Every structure is written in C-alpha cells, then in structure tokens.
Image (spheres, rainbow, N blue to C red):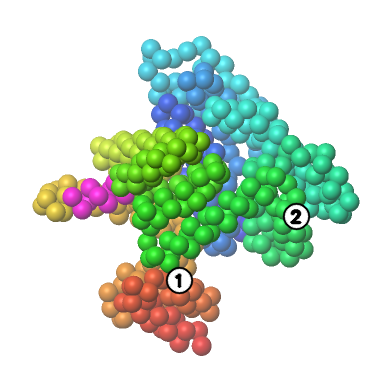
Amino acid sequence: MYQQVNCPRCNAPIAVDIQQVIDTARNPEVKYAFLNGQLNMFACQTCGLTGQMTTPLLFHDPEHEMLMVYVPLELQLAHTEQQRLIGQMVKEVMDNTPAEKRRAYMLQPQTILSYQTFVEKVLETEGITPEMIAHQRKQVELLQTLARADKDVVAILLEERADEIDETFFALMQNALQAAQERNDDKQVLGLTNLQAKLYTETEVGRRLERQQMALRKFQQDVRRQEGLTPQLLLTHILANQEEEDTVEAIATAGQAALTYEFFALLTEEIEKVARTHDKAQVKRLNGIRQALLDFQRAIQAESQEMLNRANETLQAILQAEDRPAAVQEHLPAIDEPFMYLLSEMLDQAEKQGQQARYQVLREVYDLIVREAERQVPPQIRLINDLMRAETDAEQRQILSDNAEMVTPELAEMLTMLAQEMSADRPEMVERVRALQAMVAMRVA
C-alpha cells in the first residue's frame, strides 16, 4: 500500500509502497523481495536519497507454522500503539487465511527484538541455519582482520584458520573489493587486491578457483573469436577441463544455451570413441559428466517452467483484478524478467492473431508496469525516457523547457555515456541520443 512519508534527509514528501505483512501463503514473492533487500524501498525525487523505510514487519509461513513480528525500537512506539499495530497485522493474516487452515500458533505471534534476528529466522525457512550464518560471520571477521594485518600475522592466520577459506570466503572478498572500488577507497582496494592475489597462490581453494577462472576466460574468448557459442565449442572446453569437476560445471553454466540435443550427441560420440581405446577410467569420467549435464539441463528446464508458471499466476491475478493499477502495485515484487518475457510473448501473440480486445488489456498492464517502473527511477532518467519517446524536435524542446531545472551538464554527460554504451547495430537510436545530447549541451553552454 502506498503511503506518503517524509524523506529522512530533506523532509520532502515521498510516496512509498510500504508492505508490513510478509505472508508466504498469499504472496511468496514478497518474502524474496524482503530477503533481497528490495522491500519498502524509497527514492526521493527532490534530493535523490534512496533507502529502506523503517517499519514494523510481520512474517507468516504456514508451512513452518511461524508467525513473528518485529517492531523497530527506533520508532519509539508506546506499548499500546505497538499492540494495536501487531493486532492489525495479525488480523490481516487471519482474514486472508481460510477458516479450515487457521491454527493456534496464529493467535500468539512471536516478538523479535532485532532486525538481524528477524532476517535470520526468515532465512531458516530457506534452510539457512544459524550455524551457517555464524560461520559466515566468522569469515567476514577473518577477512577484515586479514585486510588490516601485516605479512607475519597473515601467514599465521592462513595456517590457523585454513578451514574458513573456501569459495564463500573468496566471494565475500570479491564483494568487499567491489564495494571499496565503488567508494573510491584506494587504500582498501589496494589491500584487498594484494590479499586476493596472495590467497590465489597460497591456498588450495585459491589455486583451484584461479584455474577455473582462467578456463572460463579462455572459453569466453573463444566464443567471441568464433562470433557465437556452438555445441561443438562447449564440448571442446568441457573435454579440455574434464578432470576439474567444478570447472566443468562453471563452463556448462556459462554455456548452458548450447546444452542441446546436438551437444549430447557429440558427447556420446566422444565417449564411444574413448571406449574403443579401452580407457575405462576416462569412459567412466565422461559418462559421469554426461549424466551430470543431463541432470543440470533438466533442472534448468524445470526451473524455467516454474518461473513461467509463477509469472503466469501473477499475470492472471493482475488481469482478473477489478483495480488493475492497484494489482500491479501489489504484485510489483513478482514482476521480474520471466514475467516481462511472458507478457511480451502474449502481447505479440495477441497482435499476430488479431485478438484486439486481449491485446488492449495486455497493453494496459504493460503500460502500467512501465509507468510504475519509471516512478521509481531518478528524475533525470525519467526525463531521458520522455525525450526519447517524443516524436519531434519541437516536442523535445518543449519537454526540456518544462524541466529546465534538470537541464544540466550532468544530463548532457549522461546522454553522452548512453550513446557510447548503446550497441553499434542500432545506429538510428545512437544518432537520436547524440542529437539529444547536442540539444542539451547547447542549453547548458
């Protein structure tokens, strides 16, 4: 539900889609939006501040018979106000649960005092245990210590805590390095880069990951060199790395589009060829790879089908709603790439089959989503979108005049970057962006 609140920085009024009830029985997508840090996000159009609103939350998972509430202490709510809010949220869950599915646990929500604990308990429903979370915390602490320590201390820590340095540790280190680069923290970047290089050469997992990355780079280079991925190219690289199970998996993941009937036919031919040499060990290894890749392909297909099924459920709920704009807002966390792919396919099909009424309804949903997405992007991006949609130079000039306060050197720079990043196979669009950039540049000169 959209509510008007004040920006924490500039106090300007902003509209925020605040969702306080996370009910997996009703809207499972809200749970994943919460875990991905996308729930209750705001963007101030006045000062540009973005963040997450602090608000009471209720989590309900009937499969685990879990009902818990979190009321942030910083809200400084009186006890009676807290109880009123909790009562409202519990009532919402009860009202949306069929009578035959209501259980006693729903009458006694567990109160959680810290946001971190609330998140951890939600993660538990995904099979992520407190022990796993504690292990990762230790890894974060180790990374912070290693980044600050001198060479002698690093050597001791690498020996004493070798069991904590695994693939997850390297992922944490890469995330920390990227964050430091975004902050322009040169000292931190240098320290983490040196640490990363040391761990790649001095730990077994590091050496294995480096071999994997080198194999992936070579695979990607060959794909570019041959101007496209083919089943034969994928097979060549899998065979070259067949003794490294993790590397085979990484290459197959990167080249999953080539896991076709032709690929498996070529792999079967290779196995038969090796069998004629009586190399039983290699035949066994290649048969294992074939089975693993078949399982991987089936899992991808099943996951894709599941995503499309979820997308279709969401789309049907929006189409059948009496208030479609409200339905789009309610299901916004579930509107992802599979959803937009499905919607685009349905639009295309309706247009080709001359189903004008269906096309208009689907187009209405598409336009509602686009408008909602644009509402959440920075004002200058919205301005660029408006300019690109304008049909004539006169319309573009009028839009620039109506938004004179946003016509700045930064806008001209954004258009320059956009033109540089656009694909060369769209020359008309590139030229259009360059013309816009010139128009803006003249106004700010």
Q: Is the magenta stretch mostly helix, strand or loop?
A: helix
The vertical placement of 206 against 435, above or below, is above
Image position of 295 (left or right of 414): left
Q: What element carries label 2?
A: helix
The vertical placement of 189 against 388, above or below, is above
Q: Which residue has dot 2 on it?
A: 198
Give the quadrant of the N terminus. Answer: top left
Name the kind of residue labelled 2 in the image: Lys
Seen from the viewer's position, the closer of residues 1 and 317 is 317
Say if residue 407 shows up in the picture.
no
Image position of 394 (left or right of 40): left
Image position of 79 (left or right of 424): right
Q: Which residue is drawn at 51% across and 77% down?
A: 413
Q: What stretch is highlighted in magenta?
A: 341-349
Label 1 CA crowd tier, 10 Å (few <14, some 14–19, many 20+): few
Q: Which residue has dot 1 on it?
A: 421
Q: Is mark 1 on a helix, strand or loop?
A: helix
Rendering coords of residue 392 (x, y %): 28, 78
**Total label count?**
2
Rendering coords of residue 143 (x, y %): 75, 47
Name the kind of residue labelled 1 in the image: Glu
Does the magenta run of residues contain 230?
no
